[in-house]
Image (cartoon, grey):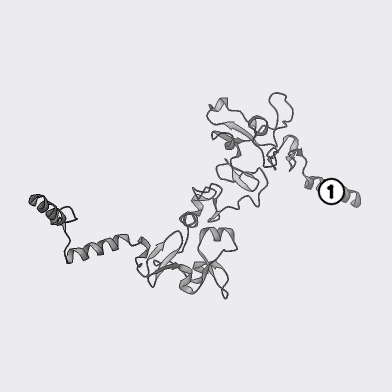
């Protein structure tokens, strides 16, 4: 019995840490608590370094140990610029006393003196002649380098169905610069159906509509086909995509109704000429 009591007494004295060598004492206990506290701290709770950039995408810098908008360096707030290209390319700042404008107009620059500007826009601005008419943003194929800006408004002043890129691969479709043939398959490319139908010898009815060809075929086997009839490529209103402005047979031009017609200006000019001739006779 005495041996059993002695065993139970010794067992109660065993350390709870498993191995007696790992029992915390004094300094080691406080070190453990400090380590746990540091590890459990949120990553963002550490103070930033004044003057450094906290976020390139959000245009935030460190000020008094806190990440703030670069606009606040001049007591301004981020805002939306009036010009679409400026709003896309730059950080825009303003307040009650200053109109919303790109940050560099207010003297707000990076620490190295450069503008708060998207990299895609920087390429267009610095290499505009080389990149003119080419895509400038991989994430947005509708944006092209135009006049030194990464612009999305290329189709605002163009006729529907007209080419909008330097490679002549995209056309303006409902104010978007795209290759609508690729909606059906990526290997379909934009082309112009012939003015004269090779099968009938008469004026082609497809001339004023979007046509596509299969890039995967050999050049001698490629043929422009009506996109609406063969591939069901259409507008949001389920209508064919017109190629306004293309020249037709007989000196006519494709109008906004998808029909080859004589230009209204030409008719007016002819009528005016007849009136003047009769007047001066």
Q: Is residue 263 left or right of residue 19?
A: right
Q: Secondary structure at mark 1?
A: helix
Q: Is residue 150 above or below residue 31?
A: above
Does 89 sit left or right of 248 as displayed?
A: left
Q: Quadrant of residue 194?
A: top right
Find disc 1 in the rendering and name its residue: 273
Where residue 216 sits in the image (x, y, percent)?
A: 52, 29
Q: Position of residue 233 (x, y in %)?
A: 64, 36
Question: How far across and down, in percent of the image, does residue 117 sit?
Answer: 47, 60
Instruction: Report which quarter residue 42 is drawn in.
Output: bottom left
* Left or right: 77 as drawn, with respect to 259: left
Identity of the residue drawn at 56% across and 45% down = 166
The answer, for residue 281, to whether it is visible in the render is no
Q: Is residue 101 left or right of 66 when viewed as pictured?
A: right
For the residue pair 142 and 254, the one nearer the viewer reads as 142
Q: Is residue 98 visible?
A: yes
């Amino acid at each position: 019995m005495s041996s059993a009591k002695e065993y139970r007494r010794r067992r109660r004295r065993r350390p709870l840490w498993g191995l007696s060598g790992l029992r915390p004492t004094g300094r080691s206990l406080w070190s453990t608590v400090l380590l746990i506290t540091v590890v459990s701290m949120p990553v963002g709770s550490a103070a930033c370094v004044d003057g450094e950039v906290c976020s390139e995408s959000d245009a935030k810098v460190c000020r008094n140990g806190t990440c703030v908008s670069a606009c606040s360096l001049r007591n301004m707030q981020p805002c939306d610029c009036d010009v679409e290209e400026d709003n896309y390319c730059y950080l825009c700042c303003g307040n009650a006393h200053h109109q919303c404008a790109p940050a560099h107009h207010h003297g707000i620059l990076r620490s190295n003196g450069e503008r708060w500007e998207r990299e895609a826009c920087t390429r267009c601005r610095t290499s505009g002649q080389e990149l003119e008419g080419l895509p400038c943003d991989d994430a947005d194929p509708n944006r092209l380098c135009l006049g030194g800006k990464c612009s999305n408004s290329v189709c605002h002043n163009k006729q529907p169905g007209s080419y909008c890129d330097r490679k002549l691969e995209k056309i303006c479709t409902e104010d978007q610069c795209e290759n609508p043939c690729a909606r059906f398959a990526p290997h379909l490319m934009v082309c112009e159906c012939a003015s004269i139908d090779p099968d009938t010898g008469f004026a082609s009815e497809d001339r004023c509509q979007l046509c596509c060809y299969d890039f995967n075929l050999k050049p001698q086997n490629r043929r422009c086909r009506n996109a609406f009839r063969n591939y069901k490529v259409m507008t949001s209103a389920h209508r064919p995509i017109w190629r306004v402005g293309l020249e037709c047979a007989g000196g006519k031009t494709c109008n906004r109704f998808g029909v080859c017609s004589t230009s209204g200006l030409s008719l007016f000019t002819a009528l005016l000429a007849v009136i003047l001739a009769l007047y001066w006779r």
